[in-house]
Amino acid sequence: MPTKTVRWSGSNELFQSSPTHSPTSSPSSSLSGSLELTPPFPIEIRICEKLRFQQNIEIDFVNDLLNDPTEGILDSESGDADELATEPFVSNLVVISSKLPVTIRIDEDKEEMGITVCALLRQLFMALHEQVATEELESARPEVRVNILKAFARRCDNLAEHSVARAVQQQEAGPRKIDYLEGFSKLAGFEVVPSDHGDLTLRLHVR
C-alpha cells in the first residue's frame, strides 16, 4: 500500500503515514456517537550514516563514482555491502542531481529485502556510466555541452596515465552521463528531498 507524505523534517528525514488510517469511535459516554480522529503515527525514513550528506564533513568512506564500488571498498567481503541504505528500508528510490538532466531510478527486485548501500552505489555507478546519446548531447545548452566535452577529455587524459588502452576505448565510446558532473566524481553523500511521486527521492552530492 503506498504511503502519504505528511511532514518533512530537516534534510535527511522523511515522515510518512499510511493512507489506510481511519477514525475510531470515541469511548466517552458523554459524547456518544462522536468520532475521535487519532493522529497518524509518522514513519521516519533516514539515510544510513555512511551515505548521509553533511556540509564540510567527509562521509565514512571514500568512493569515487568513476570506479565500480564492488571492485573496491564495497567488495563481497565488506561489511558495508549488505548494510541497508535507509532505515526503515525501501525497495524503490530515485536519485537526482542539479547537474544531471535525468533522474536515476534505483530498484530492489525483492521488495522484502530493501536497497543496500552496495546496491545503491552499484546501480548509481552503472547509470552514470551509460553513454550520452548524440541527440542528447546536441540538444544540451551550448555551455552545458562545452562543459561535458571538457570533463570527458579530462577523464580520458587522467585514465591514460594508468591505462592507454582503456583511455582509447573511452575516447571511442564518447561521453558518458558521469561527464555531466563536470569532473566532480567523489561521493559526498545524499540527502532526502521533497517529491511529488511516491518513491523516496535522494539528492546526490559530489565534490
Image: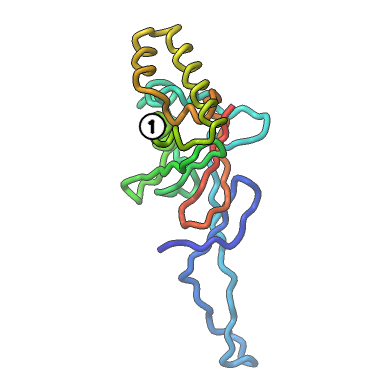
Colouring rule applied to residues: rainbow
Q: Which quadrant does the N terminus fall into?
A: bottom left
Nearest the eye: 10 or 65: 65
From the viewer's perspective, tell me whether residue 203 is left or right of residue 82: right
Residue at screen point 36% across, 12% down? 168
Q: Identify the amino acid type marked 1.
A: Thr
**Which residue was labeled with disc 1?**
134
Q: Residues within 10 Å of mark 1 (few under 14, many from 20)?
A: few
Vertical relation: 173 (above or below) 44: above
- Which residue appears at 37% of the width and 18% of the height? 170
The residue nearer to you, when weighing 193 against 17, is 193
Farthest residue, direction left: 109
**Residue under the point 46% across and 37% down:** 139
Q: Is residue 76 left or right of residue 90?
A: left
Residue 194: horizontal and vertical position, in percent?
Answer: 57, 52
Instruction: Return the residue nearer the eye: 181 or 49.
Output: 181
Residue 128 at x, y = what percent? 43, 32
Left/right of residue 3 with respect to residue 193 in the rendered view = left
Whether residue 110 is visible: yes
The x, y position of residue 47, in whole percent, is 54, 42
The image position of residue 152, as x and y in percent, is: 47, 21
Is 39 rendered above or below residue 133? below
